[in-house]
Image: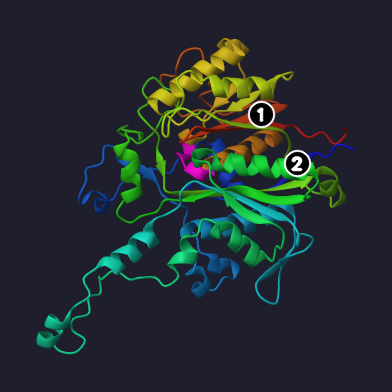
Amino acid sequence: MQRRVVITGLGPATAIGIGKKDFSTGIFTLKTCIAEIPNSYELNYTFKSRYFVPKPEFTLSKFGIHKSLEGLMEESSKISVLCTMLALEDAGFKISDAEKYWQVEGLEDSGIIMGIGMSSLQTALEAYSAHTAETDNSASASCSGSGSDLNPHKPRYNRMVIPMLMTNSPAAWISILFGLKGFSYTLNAACASGSYALGEAYRTILSGRCDVILAGGIEALVEKNGGIMRGFDMLSTLTRAKDGRPQPFSQERSGFLFNEGAGCVLVLEELEKARERGAHIYAEIVGYESCSDAYSIVQMDPSGDSISCLLQKITSGIKLDYLNAHGTGTIANDDIEAKVIQRIFGSKNAQPYINSTKGILGHSIGASGALEVAVMALSIKESRIHGNLTSAPLNNLNLPLETLATSINYALSASYGFGGHNALILLKRYDDNE
């Protein structure tokens, strides 16, 4: 019998809401969380983009993780653990105390695939500064007396810098803390990382290798002096809007809104296993396609040929009701994506409903694809699509400007990343009678 894959748990963590309930409310009410860049960002550089989305505020001690253990994790790992806890609880799995940390009943051999774009450089920067700082204070010590030469602002070299910076750490900490002994790894495909993780998890379950996989995307680009945001600013990819709103697919767009931290883990299960335990099913995954532009390290192929082929392949033979577009708000990318949509689906009246979740959340790089698939799963289950925070929308695009109620049978998420990494995830409404 053909295996099928369904989504049974959602664990989002964003500035507009942590957990399914608050996240869903924030998305469908078009809630935003936009902050002005702090003065510390502009000590040596003047930003063209004046706003960003802060990371979600939380502590793992609320869930019983000791502060000393939490101190061994970079922000991306903390977010991955939080999102996993939320996803498992939403999926109805029992999490109990174990000899070391936790145990999840029935998931001892499940897999873990996490997507990450680049993660924070804060620990690396502090360690490198400490390593290269002048350390000979003998002159000042001889003049000022014992101990008075100690500088409280001197950079500190963290002895755990290596395990904190390992890109596998977000997946490893999930495995360690929840006692999951199946395969676990992270993958990187820039802004499409979360989508790739979900797609590979889907294919792995279809193959019969595993029945349950925790998959998703996380990103934490927190840096107290804004060094990472500066990198995007210097590439002229960030919004220059006076209110910070990126306005994807608007004639007034100027770039994406930088999101310094977010994440989402989803529970993917083989259908019969999910049915056996009476799981709540959001939607079924019925398609995944990926490819490379082979064009530029930072620009989309202007022809749009690669993503056109993907869209044509994955939507062949179905009527698509909803497209959660990549929709960053950058001038070139939105224009290319809009032309591809028109090429594949035709005029506005023939197109599916189109929206950009990045217009609400900002662009969270490696986390964005997973968050957008979670939005689609909620949309299918709740029969509603969030509106676009966009004024002066581009012509000939089916862009609802307010949240609307509508039945959705097929929904598609599109992610296109730096380096030409493209991925599409197709969801279908789940029917108990099928």
Q: Is residue 227 left or right of residue 90?
A: left
Q: Nearer the viewer, residue 376 or 418?
A: 418
The secondary structure making up most of the magenta span is helix
Q: Quadrant of residue 151?
A: bottom left
Bounds of the magenta segment: 360-367
Query: Outermost residue toward the bottom?
Result: 146
**Three-letter residue code for mark 1:** Ala
The residue depicted at 25 percent of the width and 74 percent of the height is 152
Q: Which residue is mark 2?
A: 6
For the N terminus, the quadrant is: top right
Residue under the image location 61 percent in, 47 percent down: 216
* Percent x, y of residue 428: 73, 31
Residue reaching furthest to the right: 1
In the image: residue 8, left or right of residue 230: right
> In the rendered structure, which disc, 1 or 2, sits on the residue that comes first in sequence?
2
- Residue 182 position, x and y percent, is 72, 59
**Residue at point 23% right, 49% down?**
42
Question: Does residue 79 sit above or below 416 in this rendering?
Answer: below
Q: Secondary structure at mark 1?
A: strand
Q: Secondary structure at mark 2?
A: strand
Can residue 370 be seen by looking at this rendering? no
Nearer-the-camera pick, 177 or 298: 298
Could you tell me which quadrant the C terminus lies in? Answer: top right
Q: Which residue is mark 1?
A: 411
